[in-house]
Image: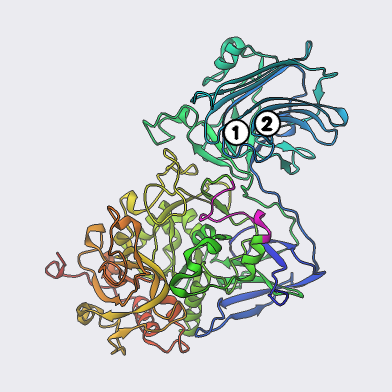
Amino acid sequence: MSDFPKLSVVGYADRQSVAPGETVRFMVSNEGNINQYRARLMRMHSLDSRAGGCGLIEEDVPADFAGVYPARHQQLTTGSYIRFAESQQPDWLGSFTLQAYIWPTLPGEKCQSIIAYWNDPTKEGVRLEIDSKGALSLVLAESHGVETVVSTETPLLKGEWYLVSATFEFETGDVCLSQKPLRRYPKINEPALVRTTVDIGHQWSGAVLSIAAHSTKGIESNHCGFFNGKIDRPRLARRALTADEIVALAADRVPTELSQDIIGCWDFSIDQGTNHIHDLSLSLRHGEAVNLPARAMTGHNWVGGNNDFKVVPEQYGAIHFHDDDLYDARWEADFQWTVPDSLPSGCYAVRLDNADMPGYIIFFVRPPRQGAGRRPKIAFLAPTAHYLAYANYRRLKESNLISEGGRLWQFGPEEVLLEQRPNFGNSFYERHTDGSGVCYSSYLRPVLNMRPDTRLSSLAGDGYVLAFLRECQMDYDVITDEDLDREGRGLLDSYLVVMTGGHPEYTTKRMWDALVGFLQRGGRLMYLGGNGFYWRVAFHNTLPGALEVRRAEDGERTWIAEPGEYYMSFTGEYGGLWRRNGHAPNELVGIGFTAQGFDTATYYRRNSDAKDPRVEFVFAGVDDEIIGDFGVGFGGAAGQEIDRYDRSLGSPPHALILASSEGHTDHTLLAKEELNHTDLGVGGVENELVRADMVFFETGYGGAVFSSGSISWVAAMPWNNFENNVAKITRNVLQRFVDDEPFTMFKVAEAKP
């Protein structure tokens, strides 16, 4: 292991897409034992050095930040909570009531704060928490860390709702601590009530109020004691309430008779798509959610009659907090750079050379935002939503990919470092430490598998498309998913051709509509992958780089959203598969996901439709019957995840099926959404639906679509220095697509039934 390459320098940029004239900041951290690193700018023309491909191709680009920098380690703390600005802090706390509905998911693991008013430097304050034994506790601490702890000594059950409260009467020292389960199991989950008297010498002041954690040094500092689970309707009163008053305060609004006593009444159902936290009390003590805890979550009173939080917001008053949530690492910038106006659009990286292996910070230079002038005819759509979905993918060690078909995968340096640094945040394919699914991702953190030679990210395959365009000497711009989501179809108006990479799996509604509009006005789309346009996702409207998914109802999933939590908090849209949203990928690109397998890839065989005069240009100079029996991606052009034509799912009736794959093994299995019930015969040997279809069809106003139907297609293109039939077919299509001559729509008589 001592000779294993080490990834010692990591970093991230404050944006994935940057236009000429804009400034991008770069944050770097030393995760090894190096003293310095050299930063330089590279244009990336290919991002994979595996044998059989075109190799890693990177080009030095002059940049004013280039040079040697001291290496420093930057701390990173995960965990979500609610903080309050200094102006929103209570001046003091004497007698009080703290209460909330809670749904704990890791009771007994460690102490977890529910509501805290805490001054860590002096170790004094108040914390309502779950203690290390899983019971509700109230911590009352005076100066110098002298703590008085009152506990119910009754462990809370995981995944059950409770109304918890703590009251303290300063004049008498009376404490009342209560945990009331909303669902009782006799002898197991009974209410717990503790009354006692404590000796506290003074009132608390100058502490920091927070929910779902407590402060370590101040409002802006890292917090600790993170809560795992849901919190609903937290409340803070400046006197000890009675039991009846606590129940009354747990309702939707502040009772009129209590309005002068309540100094915090937070309603999490308001502004679900933001990080704003609203206080309904007269104090207007509004807060901010830090590190994107999950919103639009079912609350203590959700009855299951409606699954849309916009319709019954009062039933979605919960936020799900996790101790491993991460939106922004908040590192300091080591250097920044303003993109010159003359720099070509493309994929770029800051290369961080050091004594160990180099680090990379990948980003994209897009075309100018205003006054772009004359642009190339081609735009490559970089699937940054996919990169975010797979950001810091950790499931390789648990996956059947390790030994699929006898193939042994080798861990790379990024997997090793991710094992050592779990606080770099998760991908959409992981679960949080409490077992709930990860539904948010962000690029404001190190993304270790977004670098050359990484696996289970489409970056390497997308690099083959860029290398192909370079080989063809075709000018192109790079636009990103986030760009397209922000700007819509107008971003595509300058282009005749849009090309995808090998796995554009995650698509927002605005992206979908933009691509449909592009085709309807005569654009040409080259979909060069598989399992594309599969999950419906949403970018955050105001927080840059934040993406949301809800694994709803169906599809190939590593976790499933809880009932009632299928709508995305960012936009209010229904999540899950596009197919479940009434728009299967077949409608857009003629084919849709049908099967996956990772033992080996196979080839295509030409169909009779390949002889149609409409596609004569596709096979110009290609006489082979067999297409793509080679490639970097598992040895063939048809593999990993594959798509098929299906009229019932919206594939156009006039589309031509040019070729279909064959020879898949029983390790390539039919997709879950294709099964109405469990059955045998779902593998590639027996099931005819396990195939990749290459299709072509015309659209209105002279446009057209070409779809390859396989992730492995792009990894076959560079084989033999791009001298092969996969690259030739792709080149033929691209050359025809950049030709201004409109495509002629089919005759009705030629349409398939």
- Is 423 magenta? The answer is yes
Please tell me in which quadrant of the rendered image residue 660 appears: bottom left
Label 1 environment density (alpha carbons within 10 Å; few <14, some 14–19, many ≥20): many
Decide if residue 265 is in sight here.
no
Quarter of the image with the C terminus is: bottom left
Residue in the picture at 66% in, 79% down: 60
Residue in the picture at 46% in, 89% down: 720
Per the image, the residue denoted by label 2 is 129
Q: Is residue 194 left or right of residue 440?
A: right
Label 2 environment density (alpha carbons within 10 Å; few <14, some 14–19, many ≥20): many
What label sits on residue 277 in the rendered view?
A: 1
Amino acid found under the numbered disc labelled 1: Ile
Quarter of the image with the N terminus is: bottom right
Q: Say if 740 sits above or below 275 in the image.
A: below
C-alpha distance separating marks 1 and 2: 21 Å
- Residue 169 is situated, as x and y percent measured from the top left of the image, at 74, 14
Residue in the picture at 40% in, 57% down: 556
Q: Earlier in the sequence, mark 1 or mark 2?
A: 2
Q: Say if 630 sits above or below 66 in the image.
A: below
Amino acid found under the numbered disc labelled 2: Glu
